[in-house]
Image: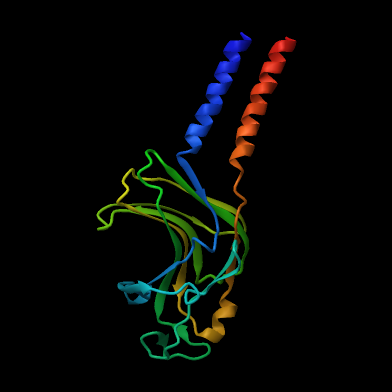
Amino acid sequence: MLKKLSLVGLLSVAGLLSHSALAVTKTVDSTTLVNGYMNVFNLPADGGSYQFGSSWGTQDLSSNFSNSSTVTLGVNSVNDPASYWYIPSGGPGAAGNKIMEANLYAESTVTGLGDTTLTFNGTVLANSLDGAHSVVAFIRDFAPDFSSFNGQTVALTPGDFSVTLALTNDPARHVQYGFTMTGPNVWITDAAAAGTVTVTAVPEPSSFALIGAAIAGLFAVTSRRRRA
């Protein structure tokens, strides 16, 4: 019975390691969250139609890392006083005339590994955004021609967050994860009053620690069997 139980336990450990090889976890990291993209829309009152999108530098997105694992996300401003951007025109107190969707994200190459799941997690240290702006964490998995798209999001409130997506087994697809800030543009002197969100990394568990815990559990079971 002891030998049989030990074999079952070892197979369980092997199964855990095999499953872990197909489960990828990412967290907040300044070396991977290096891409910025801005989508611009009309205000809902003006129909909300898509205007344009373009790559932006991460600092232009008001995404600033204080260290390698902590980022503060601010609302977006456009340094152009034209009425296209502000009502009636740009200046302190002016209302934004566009909805800005700022994306800070990483590109990940984890497709083509079979039934892979990707998890993106972290801890929200603070969220002082006004009611006009919101931030989500996201994972996206899409075809290069955008013919198919999978995604998951989670709103960022103080405390831990985690978003998980089962990826399509196709190495040609694009996989992105990161944060999206959405809301009207504000004049730069009004940005601080609109609030920020500060997010930090969740320490990634050591694979050796997971293996050790599984083996320790096996030994505990076999020890109880001996005493019985």
Residue under the image location 63 percent in, 11 percent down: 2
Instruction: Judge by depth and name the residue closer to the eye, 177 or 186.
Output: 177
Q: Is residue 63 left or right of residue 214?
A: left
Residue at the outermost front position: 208
**Residue at the right extreme, as displayed:** 227
Instruction: Look at the picture and state if 98 lies above or below 181.
Output: below
Query: Where is 213 relative to 26, above or below?
Result: above
Q: Position of residue 139 (x, y in %)?
A: 43, 54
What sort of colour scheme is used for the picture? rainbow
In this orientation, which residue lies closer to the viewer: 206 or 154?
206
> Which quadrant does the C terminus fall into?
top right
Residue at 69% from the left image edge and 22% from the top image edge: 220
Placement of the N terminus among the 4 image quadrants: top right
How many marks do you count on the picture? 0
Q: Is residue 60 left or right of residue 126?
A: left
- The quadrant holding residue 193 is bottom right
Front residue (pair 132, 212): 212
Q: Is residue 143 left or right of residue 154?
A: left
* Residue 114 vertical placement versus 28 (above, below): above
Q: Locate residue 153, reporting x and y percent.
A: 45, 55
Percent position (x, y) of residue 85?
Answer: 39, 84
Where is residue 213 drawn, in percent x and y?
Answer: 65, 32
